[in-house]
Image: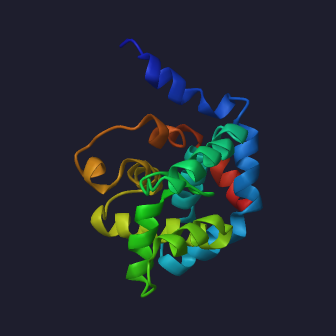
């Protein structure tokens, strides 16, 4: 039997962690926002819920990271991600322009600070990823969300992007219970 590497063990144990109930509760409380945006953009809601799972897995610490993000934004770092789906400001600016909005930095920060708008932007980004990765399922899209399209196409792996993979049953329960 092949020896399991440490990363695979860690990924497999994600669902039994002390952090799991908190992030599943976040998904359950936002299920209607996730489903509505997913329907609007034609994306499986499991992809959006998987993104929230992987990006907000560490609960308080994931949210506290946004304080560092606020500082980074003040010094002009638009590659930093924040909000309920941890989206980069520069990605939000680009997606807003696709929508016909001005797509300014301040508009992107405002949208990412407002949960329903931030979730809708994240699902829009998942739609864009789906267009470029047509055979990708929900967990593949969640991984691509974290990696970015180029890295996803290159077949790179992301520990963060794999957090939700082994917990699909739990995520589905939070989304549809």
Q: Nearer the viewer, residue 52 or 135?
A: 52
Spot the residue most to the left.
154
Figure quadrant of residue 39: bottom right
For the N terminus, give its image quadrant: top left
Q: Horizontally, is 143 left or right of 170 in the view? A: left
Residue at screen point 61% across, 43% down: 65
Q: Residue at x 57, y 64 (%)?
A: 45
Report the quarter where the C terminus lies. Answer: bottom right
Quadrant of the rendered structure where residue 58 is? top right
Examine the image and state in which quarter residue 85 appears. bottom right
- At horizontal 30% and vertical 49% (from top left) the residue drawn is 152
Q: Is residue 142 above or below residue 13?
A: below
**Image position of 69 (left or right of 152):** right
Which percent across, then down, holds residue 158?
Answer: 40, 38
Q: Position of residue 174 (x, y in %)?
A: 72, 53
Residue 163 visible in the shown view: yes
């Amino acid at each position: 039997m092949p020896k399991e590497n440490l990363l695979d063990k860690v990924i497999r144990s994600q669902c039994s962690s002390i952090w799991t109930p908190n992030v599943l509760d976040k998904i359950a409380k936002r299920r209607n926002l996730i489903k509505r945006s997913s329907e609007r953009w034609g994306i499986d809601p499991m992809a959006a819920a998987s993104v929230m799972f992987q990006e907000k897995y560490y609960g308080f610490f994931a949210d506290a990271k946004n304080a560092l993000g606020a500082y980074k934004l003040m010094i002009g770092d638009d590659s930093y991600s924040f909000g309920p789906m941890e989206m980069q400001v520069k990605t939000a600016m680009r997606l807003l322009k696709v929508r016909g909005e001005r797509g300014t930095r301040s508009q992107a920060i405002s949208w990412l600070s407002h949960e329903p708008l931030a979730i809708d932007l994240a699902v829009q980004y998942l739609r864009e990823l789906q267009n470029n990765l047509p055979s990708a399922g929900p967990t593949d899209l969640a991984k691509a969300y974290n990696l970015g399209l180029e890295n996803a196409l290159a077949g790179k792996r992301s520990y963060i992007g794999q957090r939700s993979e082994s917990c699909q049953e739990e995520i589905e329960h939070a989304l549809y219970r």
